[in-house]
Image (tube, rainbow, N blue to C red):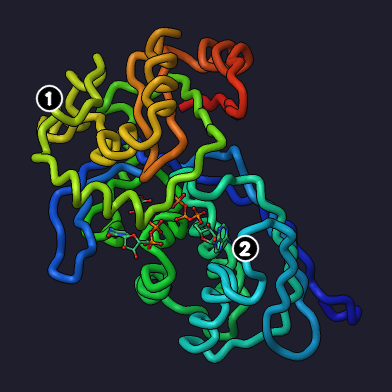
Amino acid sequence: MDDGTMETAALRIGCKVNLTLRITGVRPNGWHELDTVFLPLAEPSDTLRLALRPGGGLALHCAEPGIDPENNTLTKAYRLFAEASGFRPGVEAVLEKGIPHGAGLGGGSADAAALLGWLNARAPEPLPLPELVGLAARIGADVPFFLYNVPCRASGIGERLVPCPEWLDAAGVAGAGLVLLCPRERVSTPWAYAAWDEWNRPLTEARNGAINRASQKPLDGASSIHWLENSFEPPVFEAFPRLRRLREQLLRQGAFAAVMSGSGSSLFGLFRDAGTAFRVAEGFREKDVAAYSHAL
Ligand SMILES: C[C@](O)(CO)[C@H](O)COP(=O)(O)OP(=O)(O)OC[C@H]1O[C@@H](n2ccc(N)nc2=O)[C@H](O)[C@@H]1O
Ligand SMILES: Nc1ncnc2c1ncn2[C@@H]1O[C@H](COP(=O)(O)OP(=O)(O)OP(=O)(O)O)[C@@H](O)[C@H]1O
């Protein structure tokens, strides 16, 4: 802009669910290997208002309790990007949270990826995607996914991503409806991984607790070893029994599959179509649970 006004933007930042999540191993440093399918969802969402200003550095305003405006995923994203690219614009930012944290929805990660993308689009010498993905992985395991923000199969600690737009068809859920439940419970990701370690269950569907009809359908034609499941359910459901009950409610209301997302606490149910999902979400009456419906 050459009229002296500085550019402003309002980014609507969606979240993710892990449609399936299997912990396949533990690295010597204690981090866990995953085989998971990420699905982006438009709601719930955060809003990040950004304005370029003279000078340099990120000035972030965020009223959300539990987020330190001086030390969070956005300040880390800005710092790492500036170190890697040398681009240090003055940025005024206001973060309005709509994605609950500790919900398994990748809220903090999505914000970081959105800022990385916005900075990269304005940098004199944008970083190539592989380098941006490397920066993202240093902010958090879920951040790389949000740089793609399309259905992806992920392995490694979540940084080895393969976009899989055909997956919904292959898994027989294209055209289905998804009901997302966000209870007030908050589950810490580090705690959930430590609980899984303690639980140390062998990875079998029969003992994963995610038995549902969809689990009879292999996720992709290539292999039938990957089922709709979440390895975190047994330890997290034991600590948060209401989450198990919510999953059972979804199945009773007609979901052909119901699974927790990420390390929890949110859960989702798959229904035969968006109209059914909308009606179930609208009719969901449970204290302290927000319900959202999506068309797949
Ligand atoms: C559970 C998932 O959300 C599934 O998508 C992710 O694996 C977690 O991603 P995230 O919330 O961004 O997690 P991070 O903030 O990167 O890591 C939090 C902590 O979780 C543990 N962690 C995380 C990812 C991973 N693959 N193995 C781990 O053991 C580590 O102790 C790490 O210090
Ligand atoms: N931009 C942010 N949004 C939300 N939380 C943030 C943010 N930056 C730092 N945090 C801190 O990170 C913690 C975890 O946030 P959040 O649960 O959203 O992480 P996530 O890994 O992105 O999502 P989840 O682990 O629930 O899938 C929060 O409790 C908060 O203290």
Q: Residue 256: which quarter of the image?
A: top left
Q: Is residue 88 above or below residue 91?
A: below
* Residue type beneath disc 2: Ile
Q: Are marks 2 and 1 in contact (CB under 8 Å)?
A: no
- Quarter of the figure that contains the N terminus: bottom right
Viewer-side residue, 125 vs 51 = 51
Q: Position of residue 254 (x, y in %)?
A: 41, 8
Question: Where is 106 relative to 119, above or below?
Answer: above
Residue 206 badge: 1
Q: Establish whether ligand 2 lies closer than 8 Å to the Cβ of label 2.
A: yes
The residue at the point 26 percent across, 26 percent down is 171
Q: Please, is residue 293 above or below residue 2 in the view? A: above
What's the distance in space between the residues labelled 2 and 1, CA to CA? 39 Å
Q: For numbered disc 1, what is the local secondary structure?
A: helix
Circle 2: element type:
loop
In depth, the one of 162 and 107 nearer the eye is 107
Quarter containing the C terminus: top left
Q: Amino acid at mark 1?
A: Ala
- Which image quarter has ligand 1? bottom left
Q: Which residue is mark 2?
A: 67
